[in-house]
Image (cartoon, grey):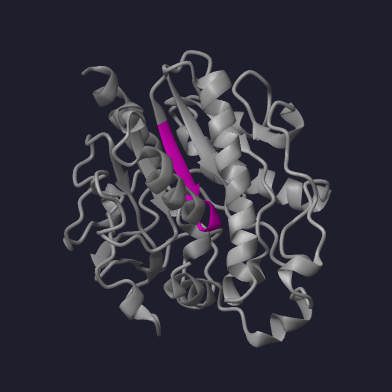
Amino acid sequence: MNRSVFYYLIIVAGISTSMNACMPHRGFEKYKQTAAPDYSDEINWIALPWRKDVADSVPKGCTIPENQDEAEIDVFYIHPTAYVLGSRWNVKLTNTSINKRSERITKIQATAFNACGKVYVPRYRQAAFRAFLNEKNGPKALDLAYTDVKASFEYYMKHWNKGRPFILTGHSQGALHLERLLKELIDGTALQKRMVAAYVIGMPIKDTAFKHIPLATNAAQTHAYVTWNTFKWGAVPKASNHFIGGSCINPFTWKADTSYAAASLNHGGVPYTFKRVDAAVCDAKNNNGILWIHKPKKGGYVAVGKSYHLSDYSFFYMNIRENALLRTKTYLAK
């Protein structure tokens, strides 16, 4: 894995070395891993479009209804790290507290897409947060997590997709796995023609990451990806060089330029409580691969130090929801 990934997660999490007490104290190989999930068993999915689950939720005040039953495309979402404090390199899928946390994150992120598509969300043996901070064992833990993500996507494609167009989306660790999935299975293949768009959010993505998948530079572009990493206005991370040459889209304009987007273009953030929609909650500007915003006008949006990593979806929830619908309609109209 690129060394910049380790540096980035240190920046966005603001976690000190005092967390070593929560770090696995043995090498990756010393832990017996649980069996790989069987994705034919629905217990290994957080969300499936034919059952009632967290991906069906809509925040109070949202004027765009959930529409999975009638949707003509699919959405495959990869959740971020919920396993922050733990003694293993990879979580056990029987860990009910982490499962509930993953479901909570799915509710506040993946639901942004339930108006345009049928939402699929796999459980996977996610790597612990400390995996990002250990260059010896971390890549092994992340590789294991990725094998599950890849297996879940391949199962979905073989048994459930049935040739439908799809959106791919992920955040943080989920975005890291999504970037790899795009490189290995989508980039330059027939599947790219069926990919409406990829929302690869909360992880630095270099402009050169993909050979054939372009950065989307307008609101309706398809077969392309969007990405951003949210920080407080004026923040210059210590490892800012890892953002130079990186992709960044302003989710209010859906452009890659550095023009300022006023809060009036924010159609609604959704705080962590998921109980309201906050119009014009923040502005946004792309600065050298970092998305700057001023302090939000309402509470409920999580910041850690100078980073708004944990709110990468929350600030822009309604803009994402509307944009996913637009890209879907554009794709289907071709």
Q: Is residue 6 visible?
A: yes
The residue positioned 67% from the left and 42% from the top of the image is 123
Q: Which of 63 and 144 is in front in this view?
A: 144
Question: Does the magenta stretch mainly form a helix, a strand or a loop?
Answer: strand
User: As drawn, is 128 to the left or to the right of 6?
Assistant: right
Determine the residue located farthest toward the top in the rendered image. 70
The location of residue 288, given as percent across then percent down, is: 24, 71
User: As drawn, is 80 to the left or to the right of 163?
Assistant: right
Residue 128 is drawn in which quadrant?
bottom right
Specify start and end residues of the magenta stretch as a single range.
167-174
The residue positioned 53% from the left and 15% from the top of the image is 69
Q: Can residue 275 be seen in this view?
A: no
The location of residue 101, given as percent across then percent down, is: 71, 51
Say above or below: 144 vs 123.
below
Verify whether residue 6 appears in magenta.
no
Q: Nearer the viewer, residue 115 or 225?
A: 225
Residue 78 is drawn in which quadrant?
top right
The location of residue 216, given as percent across then percent down, is: 23, 45
The location of residue 77, given as percent across then percent down, is: 52, 40
Say above or below: 125 vs 138.
above
Q: Which of 56 and 141 is in front in this view?
A: 141
Q: The C terminus is located in which quarter?
A: top left
User: As drawn, is 259 to the left or to the right of 294?
Assistant: left
The residue positioned 78% from the left and 55% from the top of the image is 33
Determine the residue located farthest toward the front in the rendered image. 29
The residue positioned 57% from the left and 50% from the top of the image is 146
Q: How many labels does the image show?
A: 0
